[in-house]
Amino acid sequence: MSEALATPDIARSVRSADAVDVVAVGKAAGPMLRAALSEAARMPLRRALGVSPFVPRGLPAGVTWHAASHPVPDDGSVAAARAVLDVAGAAQPGDVLLLLLSGGASALMALPADDVSLKDKQRAGELLLRAGAEIHALNAVRKHLSAIKGGRLAAAAGGSVLTLAVSDVVGDDLSVIGSGPSVADTTSFADALSALDRYGGRDVFPDAVVRRLTAGASGAIPETPKIGDARLVRSVAHVIGGARSAVAGAEAVARSHGYVVHVVDEPVVGEARAAAVRLVEVASAAAKTTDAPLCILAAGETTVRVVGTGKGGRNQECALAMARGLRALGPAAVAASVGTDGVDGPTDAAGGVVDSTTLARAEVADLGSPEPYLDDNNSYVFLDGLGDLIRTGPTDTNVGDVQVILVGGRSRG
């Protein structure tokens, strides 16, 4: 964060402003805001506002904080969005809004459009999440039900907007991070309607949601700001960190412990249990090329289609789905999938870890095989029964999910 603010273009922008309002939104809002305010002596700071799931400790004096909900927005999310819009709208042409975005911002700063209630928006989001909607589809709907997302925040700003984002999305697409409140939207009302059709059908979604998206697709409601919109000319955005930062850190640690490291270049996406099978296949192929201890590293964001009544999250499902394939990697194989924010789904775990002994230990513990637990989306109970949940607590950041597979040295034959 401090390094980003020290780069010439960014430093020039904030230091030459008439006034700077700093707004941090997301799971990393606390540390990002602290880092920005450590540079306050070098900028004409006027206001500082933060939004996250909880109020961080040790905030500097004068900071206004809004606690809001994730992954489903609440009244706190609405209050936060209104406060941010007020700050942006009160700015003058010579002012700069320094917007610090991180994972979770889309739900934490939510303002439904006039013809949609918060309850309608909550229900639509819940249905999409349960259906396993990928982030682009989810955000297409969010942006077209919102009065702040999809470039609308920047369009409402009276001054310039400078966004620094820590990415939690595959590909680091700024229009997806936090649903792109300060950048042009590349999706349309028609895309949002298509998402409803793909993930459950229009009949299951609230009437107000379907009416708004249908009206927008017909041209009756103005689209979100697009590339070339004059209202976005003074809005600039940069990604200053993401999943590859986490992978690079893990790679350095693995190498320091003597592992040969294989980094999977392709992002891990799609159904969690299918991604797990692919990762084990990658590990198996890589293990045939070396006798040395091997570390496979990958990152991305999978989805889970909820069909059962159990408890878990995408990282727990990914980890558990790797358990059976690990046996083919030998007696010294371990795999984990972890959410870098420390929260995996609606649970107190960040993810899970399995190894070559998981299936045998499960039999001894009378848990049986993993498959029924996966079918019921109940990975939490299985992993918890073995003491194999990873619990870190909230980490105050979010750069997506990281998967690790370790394979001990062996003799090839």
Image (cartoon, rainbow, N blue to C red):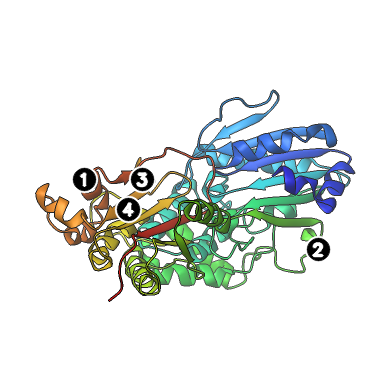
Q: Amino acid at mark 2?
A: Ala
As measured in the structure, the alpha-carbon distance from the residue carrying label 1 to the one carrying label 4 is 13 Å
**Residue 374 picture quarter:** bottom left
- Number of residues whose C-alpha sits closer than 10 Å to that of mark 2, classed few (under 14), some (14–19) or many (20 or more): few
| Residue at mark 4 | 316
Q: Position of residue 104 (x, y in %)?
A: 53, 48
Q: Is residue 331 left or right of residue 241?
A: left
Residue at 37 percent across and 58 percent down: it is: 406
Q: Determine whether, in the image, residue 39 is placed left or right of residue 239.
A: right
Tell me if residue 44 can be seen: no
Question: For this rendering, which residue is in front, 141 or 211?
Answer: 141
Q: Residue at x 50, y 71 (%)?
A: 266
Q: Where in the figure is residue 319, as x and y percent of width and height?
A: 32, 57
Q: Secondary structure at mark 1?
A: loop
Q: Name the amino acid, label 1.
A: Leu
The residue sitting at 33% across, 68% down in the picture is 280
